[in-house]
């Protein structure tokens, strides 16, 4: 049995917005029945350009159903350009996390959304087309897609790539190439992070500081928390005060105070500035905790 959150189970047993909209403004289809997962997303806009309805049809496991259901809930009320910014992490975070082996379901949701938005913008009715060179022929995954999941989710292993987009999960013939892509992308990310840091004694602008805080959370802090079923969200930055909210297992952990000082604050001191202090968002701290099912 997978370690699913209550929210995943809720959306699996009671999926919202199942079906297909007649005369939709956007249609996106991804996956294939041969691979075991497929998703069709349709949405309709109101006269103000907001997504007033979204529906899905999916063929897949509990995570595929739950992520599709949540995706439709997430994008309702959004303008198209806002929906275009929804990532697979947003979908997984909304569910309180997904087992690593099931993260590819959240990626499928994001791809269906992109295809539907593309269909709305271009008017085309073709299926989501593969962009870039195909690296994994077993699952039809391109280099662009592999690079994207590595960047967005800070993946450092071939197994991680397989969990997020299935590449490498068939014959295994592409594993060597995936390893090289990981090495290249992580090398580029390390350089980018290094370049964003101020020279010794240099001062960051507010925008640089917020960017660096967000990058440090994404790359240095979140992976450590995720390994224990937790998560963290940056809420605000006020001067040197960083306000965060713990999610998932971290939200109910008695060690949250320790995590705040010895993980979050320590990493931000190391990568951003010694002057930073971290506080938990008062509103989030009072919200009911999530529990794993
Ligand atoms: S080519 Fe990627 S697993 Fe077979």
Image: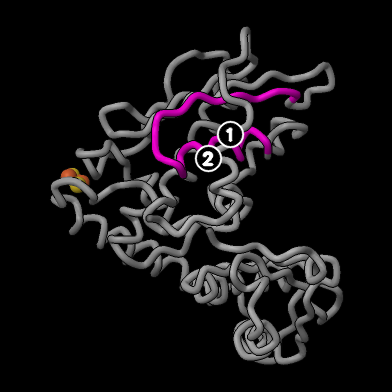
Residue occupying the far top of the picture = 23
| Camera sees residue 206 | no
Does residue 61 show up magenta in the picture? yes
Counting from the top left corner in percent of width and height, residue 7 is at: 60, 50
Q: Position of residue 97 (x, y in %)?
A: 54, 58
> How dense is the environment of label 2, judged by Cα within 10 Å: few (below 14), some, or many (20 and up)?
many
- 10 Å crowding of disc 1: few (<14), some (14-19), many (20+): some
Mark 2, secondary structure of its residue: helix
Q: Residue at x 56, y 74 (%)?
A: 195
**What span is colored magenta in the figure?**
52-73
Q: Which residue is mark 1?
A: 15
Q: Would you place residue 81 above or below residue 238 in this image?
A: above
Q: Is residue 163 visible?
A: yes
Please state the quadrant of the image where ligand 1 appears: top left
Q: Image quarter for residue 235? A: bottom right
Q: Is residue 76 left or right of residue 37?
A: right
Q: Are marks 2 and 1 in contact (CB under 8 Å)?
A: yes
- Could you say which disc has been placed on residue 12 in the image? 2
Quadrant occupied by the N terminus: bottom left
């Amino acid at each position: 049995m997978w370690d699913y959150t209550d929210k995943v189970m809720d959306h699996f047993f009671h999926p919202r917005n199942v079906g297909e909209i007649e005369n939709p403004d956007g249609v996106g289809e991804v996956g294939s029945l041969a691979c075991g997962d497929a998703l069709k997303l349709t949405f309709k806009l109101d006269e103000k350009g907001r997504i007033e309805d979204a529906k899905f049809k999916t063929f897949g496991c509990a995570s595929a159903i739950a992520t599709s259901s949540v995706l439709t809930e997430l994008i309702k009320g959004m303008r198209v350009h806002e929906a275009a910014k929804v990532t697979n992490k947003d979908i997984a975070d909304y569910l309180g996390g997904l087992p690593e082996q099931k993260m590819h379901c959240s990626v499928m949701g994001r791809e269906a959304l992109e295809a539907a938005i593309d269909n709305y913008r271009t008017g085309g009715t073709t299926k989501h087309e593969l962009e870039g060179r195909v690296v994994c022929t077993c699952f039809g995954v391109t280099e662009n897609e592999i690079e994207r999941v590595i960047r967005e989710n800070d993946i450092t292993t071939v197994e991680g790539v397989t969990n997020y987009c299935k590449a490498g999960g068939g014959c295994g013939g592409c594993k060597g190439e995936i390893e090289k892509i990981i090495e290249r992308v992580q090398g580029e990310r390390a350089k980018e992070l290094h370049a964003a840091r101020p020279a010794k004694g240099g001062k960051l602008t507010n925008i640089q500081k917020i960017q660096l805080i967000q990058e440090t959370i994404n790359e240095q802090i979140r992976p450590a928390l995720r390994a224990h079923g937790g998560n963290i969200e940056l809420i605000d930055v006020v001067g040197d005060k960083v306000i965060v909210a713990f999610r998932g297992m971290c939200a109910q952990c008695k060690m949250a105070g320790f995590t705040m000082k010895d993980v979050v604050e320590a990493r931000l001191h190391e990568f951003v500035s010694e002057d930073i202090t971290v506080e938990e968002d008062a509103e989030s701290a009072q919200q009911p905790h999530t529990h794993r099912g």
